[in-house]
Amino acid sequence: MIVEPAPAKLNLALHVRARREDGYHELETLFVFVRDGDTVRLTPAIHDGFAIIGPFAAGLSGEGDNLVTRARDAFRGRFGASEPLSIVLDKHLPVASGIGGGSADAAATLRGMAKLAGIAPDDPALMAIAAALGSDVPACLAGRTMIGRGRGEQLTPIEVPSLPVLLVNPGVGVSTAAVFAGWDRIDRGALADGDALAIAMAGRNDLEPPARVLAPAVDTVLEMLAQADGVRLARMSGSGATCFALFDRAEDCAAAATAIRAARPDWWCLETALA
Ligand code: C5P
């Protein structure tokens, strides 16, 4: 059996530069990963099977359009039929929330199947499958801090310190396509030069304004995170609605988590660290 972690992805900065002819957007983003997330378990079996368990299992359908089964089928389409697999997705990340849950699950499935088949995780054919599954899947396949360009699939590695981070989602799912469609088409410029934290601090998330229109709770989340003691940076991730706060000290991160859980027990809150 293979157990593949599918950690949450954050965009510490996300600069949307242009709308493309194909409907996607040119962007520059700083992808980072945290220590926690979903897991994908793959077990050779007599028949194919797919099940979703865990706290966010109910938000997903176990058939057809799940990114895990699409990744499995795409892998087989490229590398040939593998033995039947029982796949269990343990879903801990909220769905449609800007932290790459579905993309991470697809990437973990590809990594796990590559391990079973003896294929290198950085095989260009695997990367091509990842890019076809979604703009964030190549970064999730790499699973480490990267600058992403193009629609997010052109990757350059960069280092980031392992800072404590708090993730907060107000329980509203937003459609990535709808948030991108609400971008005002004003190019506010490239990522800054420098190390990852300098890029993050000088950066922005251009999808925050359109996401706030669709999910006004993002404003409340960001206000609460920005007011926390010791917070270094509070920002929305991806197309939202999950926001994050970076801290220098784990104690400050824990205190902020405790305060937010007490004030908003209905929100999802994850205290973790950059991987
Ligand atoms: O690539 P993915 O399927 O994850 O993208 C979902 C939607 O988000 C796309 O259909 C598109 O509307 C939007 N998107 C975009 N530009 C990107 C990435 C995603 O417009 N760079």
Image (tube, helix red, strand yellow):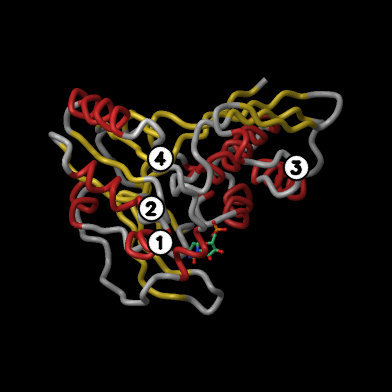
What residue would you read off at disc 2?
Answer: 156
What secondary structure is marked by label 4? loop
Judge from the rendering whether residue 256 lies leftward or rightward of residue 128; answer left or right: left
Q: Earlier in the sequence, mark 4 or mark 3?
A: 3
- Distance, label 1 to label 2, CA atoms, is 9 Å
Between 5 and 220, which is closer to the camera in this rendering?
Answer: 220
User: Going by the picture, which residue comes out furthest to the bottom?
Assistant: 21
Tell me which amino acid carries mark 2: Thr
Question: Which residue is disc 3 drawn over?
Answer: 63
Queried on whether the Cβ of the residue with tag 4 lies below 8 angstroms from ligand 1, the answer reads no
Q: Looking at the image, is mark 1 or mark 4 earlier in the sequence? A: 4
Check disc 4 and report the residue beneath it.
144
Q: Which residue is mark 1?
A: 149
Q: 10 Å neighbourhood of mark 2: few (<14), some, or many (≥20)?
A: few
Q: Kindly report the distance in space between the C-alpha atoms of the residues bearing marks 1 and 4.
A: 15 Å
For discs 2 and 3, the disc positioned in front in the rendered view: 3
Tell me the amino acid under the disc marked 1.
Arg
Amino acid of disc 3: Glu
Give above or below for 168 relative to 174.
above
Residue 96: image location, x then y, percent: 51, 48
Given contact means CB atoms under 8 Å apart, are the residues at marks 4 and 2 in contact? no
State yes or no: Cβ of the residue under disc 3 lies below 8 Å from any atom of ligand 1: no
Give the x, y percent position of residue 149. 40, 61
Q: Nearer the viewer, residue 47 or 156?
A: 47
Point out the tag, 1 or 2, that comes first from the N-terminus: 1
Answer whether labels 2 and 3 touch (C-beta < 8 Å): no
Question: Does the CB distance between marks 1 and 2 fall below 8 Å?
Answer: yes
Q: Percent x, y for residue 100?
A: 48, 45
Label drawn at residue 3: none
Q: Secondary structure at mark 2?
A: strand
How many residues crowd around disc 1 within 10 Å: few (fewer than 14), some, or many (20 or more)? some
